[in-house]
Amino acid sequence: MKEGNKLKSQRLIQPIKHALLGIVMIFGLGCATEDTQTVVNFTQLTFADEFDVDGPPNPGKWVYDIGIGPGNDGWGNGELQYYTNRPENVVVSNGYLIITAIKENFETAGYTSARLLTKGKFDQQYGRFEARMRLPYGKGMWPAFWMLGANIDTNPWPFCGEIDIMENRGRTPSIVSGALHGPGYWGANPEGSNPALKEYDFVNDRVDTGFHVYGIEWGPQYINLYVDDVLYKQFTPEDEKVTGPWVFDQGPFFMLINLAIGGNFDGPPNNETVFPQTMLVDYVRVYKYNGLD
């Protein structure tokens, strides 16, 4: 059995934003703590794909984005790949989802890759969302595990909200980032606004030589960013980088996993970038939010 199939042990987690309040209530109100403490329980599994059946990804859980974007503009980011649903670009094999970026002339692009999403299949408001992954390496590689508001068709981006659980610039194999995009703080804004972004530095490790778990824990008025269960950032509406409305309490979000090539995050590949490149996903799991706020 692959290591990733060992289920996470159950745990009770108290978010940072409530920790001090809980301590104050304990000392200020004596034994009446059960009415004042906030303890968040993320142990009830609501979605899981262990990628244990070889072949195409489970069509009951995943759909595909195909092409170079609705505006033929590289998905709004200047990306260089054509997304396909071909087995050459996306397949489940030997217990992993494998997304492969290939340098080839295909349709109108010079590269191919894949982007999967749970839109119309699964979405959820609040909870723990996590994936165990091994990422590619090389200038121009842009792997991502992220989320969009399920109301995007009627409430266009960035007003629907975007949660980037993990992004990586292929030229920096020891650094990943997480970010929030909303009105007033979103990437590619011609007025110069930036997303609420935070980087995580592995220091003595790399994203391409082993697997790591990338996740968020999301509840009312906060989103916590994790790598391997290390909390490295908490975003709240009061964060100095959240320079517009907090749009993350307005409904469920769906998940996306993709491997982009080029674009405005890491720029294009260079002569040292090796192809093909692969992104391996061991599992994706989602847990229900059972907290009391």
Image (cartoon, rainbow, N blue to C red):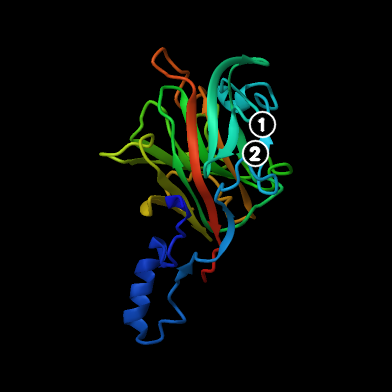
The span from disc 2 to disc 1 (Cα, nearest Å) is 9 Å
Name the image quarter holding residue 154.
Answer: top right
Residue 190 falls left or right of residue 274 = right
Whole-percent x, y for residue 287 in the image? 54, 60
16 w.r.t. 190: above or below: below
SS category of the residue bearing label 2: loop
Residue 193 visible (yes or no): no
Please name which of the two marks, 2 or 1, marks the residue nearer to the observer: 2
Q: Amino acid at mark 1?
A: Asn
Whole-percent x, y for residue 75 in the image? 62, 27
* Residue at the image point whose x is 69% and y is 24% from the top: 71
- Which residue has dot 1 on it? 85
Whole-percent x, y for residue 67 in the image? 67, 25
* Residue at the image point whose x is 41% and y is 66% from the top: 14
Residue 12 visible (yes or no): yes
78 w.r.t. 287: above or below: above
- Foreground of the two, 79 or 93: 93
Residue 56 is marked as: 2
Whole-percent x, y for residue 56 in the image? 65, 38
- Foreground of the two, 20 or 207: 207
* Residue at the image point whose x is 44% and y is 60% from the top: 8
**Dot 2, crowdedness within 10 Å: few (<14), some or many (≥20)?**
some
SS category of the residue bearing label 1: loop
User: Do tag 2 and tag 1 residues touch (Cβ < 8 Å)?
Assistant: yes
